[in-house]
Structure formats: structure tokens, C-alpha cells
Image (spheres, rainbow, N blue to C red):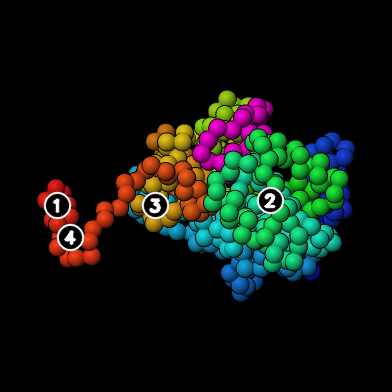
């Protein structure tokens, strides 16, 4: 049973049918999925949600399909880790990590949006899917296209990390590397989508794709006992995820699924080398000035974010803020998370951990508040960022006295 009425312009409110559309023809505003919330309220309860399988599709009434998902049916419901060791290091009492670095099947939150996008593409009759990617999205589209028996094309900047290139190639997709940064790739893909009529996950299927991110917010609330945290720190690239987490919290409140009201502050986290959204927040403006990315955090290196204005608005409406960290701080934060919680995150996770540390130091996050850090990708994808950070392992002979020699030296110098 579908609860989707159609699409609606976020700016002027013009209605559109459930088609592969993403821009309003009247005011050029972005389109979003329009739901029948009154019907959902009658159908959906905590008990119904808890009775379902532990995937993102336990919230299916609030996701953009007409029927059951056909791609990515096992995606989501990743751990919300109580990070006591990291909390102690940062000087806060209650800290959680929402860990999408172990999301199925390609170890990033993009598996959520791709599950929604490709399932919708199949409903709309598409046979070929594609995307413009900074890495994680390409991994996921390639993998889930195989699951859905769809042909796929992945367009990416030519200088992406090898882990992400190989992690896309393995699925037998068609990869096109393009000289330049993501923004140039995205512009070209818009032209290809128009000419060839393919389903581009983050272009003409974007309204459906974006709503897959809401499941990340639903899970946080459910895993906290049907409550929203005081603070959420979100990595920002195109600014879709940050807006959808905020929307998910308010949908749960509107539907009576929350204990109490939404009082969360949403914080935007970016790398200093690509920080158009956090710069706008700091300058107290909603005007996004595009930048040329220059950071190791390539998965969030979008210099002209499609939803940047709405990312700024989300932080302001929630009482949050925006902060950024440089490449050295990113690496230190990746190591800090690994050494305290045993979680190996990619560079984007280093951004959120590093920004959280800054926000605590600035007093924007209080020690007695509940805070959730969003970890959206796996560190095995960005090992190049850690090059030169560690000494080579000690090599010994396979003899006990060889080990005892180095062990006794280590003990004596401790």
C-alpha cells in the first residue's frame, strides 16, 4: 500500500506526479516526496515497527515506494554505539556513534539512499541506472544495480582514492573517470540524464534517493528509546543527509512516535578544504559561495552543494551550528575514534569526530547532553589518508628468544 501522493516543490508548493523529476518547472526549486501523513498516522505504530525486520524498510510507510522494495532489502538498522571511551576523552557524559561504516552491502550510509533510489527506478520502469559520485555512492549503485539486474554507469572524478575505485570496479559496472572535481562531474551527468533517459540516483531520481536518508534519523530515535538526542553532528557534502535527519525527527514527532518533542540541535561538519556550508553558517548568511575542494575528505568534497541553503537552514532552525577541521585534524580524529572505540572510519568520519571535539571545546555541546556523532563510511576505503602515520611492524625470527628480546626492551623503557 502506497502512502506517496506525488512530488511537491519545496519552495512554491506546486504538485507533480510520481515521475523522474527533481526540479520545479515553475520556480526551479527542488522537488520532494509528498506523503499522506494522516493515513500513515492511522497505520504506523511503534509496535508495528518493532515487529518488522531490522532494516531501513521497517519504516516503509515513510519511504518513497508504491510497493515493496526490490533492491537493498537488507540495508540499514546499523548499530548505535554507546561510546564511553571516546566520551571520556572528549569530556562529555553521554556520547553515541551511529555507525554506518558497517552498513550492508558497501559499508556506507549511501546504501540507504541507493536502496530507495534503485527500487523506485525499477518501479518507474528504468533499465539503466547511474550516478555522479565522490566514491561511496558509486560503490553502492554498482553493487545494488547487480542485485536489481540493472545496467549501471558510474561517473567520478579521476583522482578518487583507489579503494573506492576498486570498490566500484569489482561489481562489473561501467566506470567513467573525469578530469576535475565533483561539481564538474555532476553538471555533465545532468546533461547525460536528459539525453539518454537513464535513472541518475542523485539527479532525476533525487527526491526518492534523498528520502532513503530519513531512515538514518528514524533509527537514531528508535535506538535511543523513541527519543531524539540533544545534539547530532552530521557530515555535510550536498547537504541532503543533514536535512533528512531533521525531517525524520519531526515526522516521528508529528506521528506521535516520539517520547516528548524534538529538541535536537543539528551541527554541520565539513573539512576546512571544502566548507561552503559551514562558512556560510559562521558568516550568518544563507548564501552559499562555491569553492574548489582541496581536502583528503573526498567523499564530502562538494564545492557547490545542491541543498546547501537547506543545510544552513537546518542548523539555524534547530539551534545548531557549523564547524570544520583541517586535514591534520581529520587524521587525528580518525585515529582517536579507532583507538577509543575500535571503529575505523573513513575521512568523513574523521571530520565529524574532529568537529565534535571542537564543539565541546567551544561550549556549544554541553558535557551533560546526549550527543550522536554520525559515522557514514568505512576507513578501509580511504587508507591513503593514513599514509606515513604508522611505523613499520617489528620483524623477528620465529623464536621465543627473538620475541623476548624486543619485549624486555619495551618493558624496560615503559
**Which residue bears the numbered disc 4?**
402
Decide: is 367 above or below 142. above
Q: Position of residue 270 (x, y in %)?
A: 54, 37
Residue 220: which numbered mark, if any?
none
Would you call the spot at circle 1 few (<14 residues within 10 Å), some (14-19), or many (20 or more)? few
Can you tell which of label 2 and label 3 is closer to the viewer?
A: 2
User: Residue 20 at what x, y percent from top left?
Assistant: 83, 52
For residue 409, which numbered disc appears in the image?
Answer: 1
Label 1 or label 4, whichever comes before in sequence order: 4
Q: Residue 102 versus residue 379: which sits nearer the camera?
A: 379
Residue wearing tag 2 = 175
Q: Is residue 411 left or right of residue 368?
A: left
Marks 1 and 3 sit apart, C-alpha to C-alpha, by 26 Å
- The magenta span reads 287-304
User: Taken as a whole, is the magenta stretch helix, strand or loop?
Assistant: loop
Which of disc 3 and disc 1 is earlier in sequence? 3
Measured in 3D between alpha carbons, the distance from the residue under mark 3 to the one under mark 4, in whole angstroms, is: 29 Å
Q: Secondary structure at mark 3?
A: helix
Q: Which residue is at 51% across, 32% downward?
A: 272
| Mark 3 residue crowding within 10 angstroms, few (<14) / some (14–19) / many (20+) | some
Whether pointer 1 and pointer 3 mark residues with C-beta atoms closer than 8 Å, the reply is no
Q: State which tag comes first along the sequence, 1 or 2.
A: 2
Query: Is mark 1 in CB contact (under 8 Å) with mark 4?
Result: no
Name of the residue lying farthest toward the bottom:
51
Say which label, 3 or 4, has the lower sequence index: 3
| Mark nearer the N terminus (2 vs 3) | 2
Q: Earlier in the sequence, mark 2 or mark 4?
A: 2
> Which quadrant would residue 242 be assigned to in this image?
top right
Residue 297 is a magenta residue: yes
* Residue for badge 3: 338
Confirm whether residue 3 shows in the render: no
Residue 135 appears anywhere in the view? yes
Amino acid at each position: 500500500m502506497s502512502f506517496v501522493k506525488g512530488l511537491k516543490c519545496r519552495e512554491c508548493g506546486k504538485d507533480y506526479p510520481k515521475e523522474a523529476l527533481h526540479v520545479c518547472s515553475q520556480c526551479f526549486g527542488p522537488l520532494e516526496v509528498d506523503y499522506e501523513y494522516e493515513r500513515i498516522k492511522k497505520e504506523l505504530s511503534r509496535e508495528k515497527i518493532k515487529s518488522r525486520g531490522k532494516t531501513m524498510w521497517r519504516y516503509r510507510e515513510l519511504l518513497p515506494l508504491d510497493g515493496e522494495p526490490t533492491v537493498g532489502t537488507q540495508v540499514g538498522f546499523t548499530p548505535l554505539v554507546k561510546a564511553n571511551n571516546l566520551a571520556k576523552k572528549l569530556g562529555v557524559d553521554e556520547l553515541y556513534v551511529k555507525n554506518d561504516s558497517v552498513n550492508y552491502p558497501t559499508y556506507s550510509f549511501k546504501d540507504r539512499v541507493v536502496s530507495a533510489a534503485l527500487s523506485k527506478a525499477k518501479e518507474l520502469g528504468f533499465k539503466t541506472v547511474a550516478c555522479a559520485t565522490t566514491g561511496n555512492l558509486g560503490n553502492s549503485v554498482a553493487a545494488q544495480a547487480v542485485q536489481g539486474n540493472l545496467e549501471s554507469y558510474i561517473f567520478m572524478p579521476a583522482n578518487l582514492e583507489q579503494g573506492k575505485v576498486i570498490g566500484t570496479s569489482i561489481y562489473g559496472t561501467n566506470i567513467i573517470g573525469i578530469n576535475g572535481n565533483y561539481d564538474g562531474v555532476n553538471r555533465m551527468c545532468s546533461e547525460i540524464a536528459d539525453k539518454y533517459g537513464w535513472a541518475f540516483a542523485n539527479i532525476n531520481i533525487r527526491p526518492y534517493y534523498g528520502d532513503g536518508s530519513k531512515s538514518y534519523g528514524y533509527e537514531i530515535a528508535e535506538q535511543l528509546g523513541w527519543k531524539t538526542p540533544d545534539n547530532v553532528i552530521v557530515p555535510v557534502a550536498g547537504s541532503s543527509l543533514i536535512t533528512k535527519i531533521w525531517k525524520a525527527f519531526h515526522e516521528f514527532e508529528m506521528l506521535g512516535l516520539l517520547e516528548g518533542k524534538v529538541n535536537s540541535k543539528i551541527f554541520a561538519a565539513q573539512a576546512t578544504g571544502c566548507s561552503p556550508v559551514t562558512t556560510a553558517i559562521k558568516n550568518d548568511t544563507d548564501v552559499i559561495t562555491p569553492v574548489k575542494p582541496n581536502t583528503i575528505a573526498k567523499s564530502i568534497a562538494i564545492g557547490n552543494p545542491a541543498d546547501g541553503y537547506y543545510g544552513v537552514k537546518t542548523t539555524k532552525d534547530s539551534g545548531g551550528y557549523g564547524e570544520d577541521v583541517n586535514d591534520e585534524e581529520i587524521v587525528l580524529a580518525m585515529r582517536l575514534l579507532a583507538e577509543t572505540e575500535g571503529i575505523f572510519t573513513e575521512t568523513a568520519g574523521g571530520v565529524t569526530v574532529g568537529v565534535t571535539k571542537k564543539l565541546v571545546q567551544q561550549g556549544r555541546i554541553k558535557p551533560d547532553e546526549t550527543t550522536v556523532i554520525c559515522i557514514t563510511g568505512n576507513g578501509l576505503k580511504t587508507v591513503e589518508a593514513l599514509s606515513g602515520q604508522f611505523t613499520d611492524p617489528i620483524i623477528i625470527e620465529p623464536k621465543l628468544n627473538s620475541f623476548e628480546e624486543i619485549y624486555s626492551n619495551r618493558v624496560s623503557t615503559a
